[in-house]
Amino acid sequence: SAERRSWAKAIVSAASIQSCARRRAAVTSLRRSHAAATQLETMQRRRMAAGRFKIQRAAARHVQWQWKRRWHFSSATSIQASWRRHTLEARYLVGWLCIAKPQLVRLQALYRGKRLRTHFCMALAAVRQVQATWRMVRVKRLCKQLNCAALLLKRGCVMSKFVSAGSTHEAHRRLVWLTDDL
């Protein structure tokens, strides 16, 4: 019937809408997470390179300053001290990175998941709206059929009455009607 075809079309269109929404959300989320991860990695590499450059530049300036002051006799000890400081700072940075990286990964995961959860909630709300609309249509149709049946009975109609089971008598036609207060 036409009603079943329209219902089937509504289900197919709702399913295709949901499928497209999920696919689009997944692709968008993947692109954004890839861009975010790349940006975080770039910023971390830049920060580490800038830190190393800053330390090396400070050590070179210190050596130059000592040379200008004619303290070249102690330049070897100064270079050794600068190198020791550099290795300690590098160890500190590596330790900090070991502590911070899992937290950064968790933060990235939360960010990636937020967009997908939002799209999932929106799709779920859309599905619930479609289901509620379909239920509402079914209830209205049922109410209409019930009202038509009650109106038919109020007008009066002929129904067939059968004798108890096991009997071979024919059906008797009876006029049945309901009062208006019902």
Image (cartoon, rainbow, N blue to C red):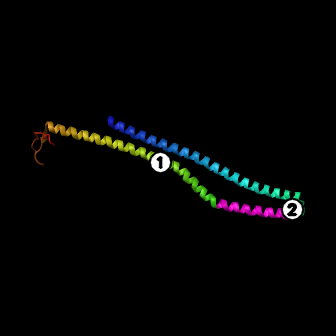
Question: In the image, residue 9 lies at what x, y percent?
Answer: 39, 37
Q: Which residue is mark 2?
A: 75
- Amino acid marked by disc 2: Ser
Residue drawn where x is 76% and y is 57% of the image: 55
Question: In the image, residue 50 lies at what x, y percent?
Answer: 73, 53
* Main SS, magenta residues: helix
Figure quadrant of residue 106? bottom right
Question: In the image, residue 52 lies at what x, y percent?
Answer: 75, 56
Magenta-drawn stretch contains 96: yes
Question: What SS does tag 2 mark?
Answer: helix
The front one of 177 and 42 is 42
Query: Are the residues at dot 2 and dot 1 in contact (C-beta closer than 8 Å)?
Result: no
Q: Which residue is mark 1?
A: 120
Of callouts 2 and 1, the N-terminal one: 2
Question: Does 33 sit left or right of 60 as displayed?
Answer: left
Which region is colored magenta?
Answer: 75-98
User: Which residue, as the protein is rendered here, is positioned at the far top?
Assistant: 2
Quadrant placement of the N terminus: top left
Question: Does 40 sit left or right of 84 as displayed?
Answer: left
Residue drawn where x is 29% and y is 43% of the image: 139
Figure quadrant of residue 85? bottom right
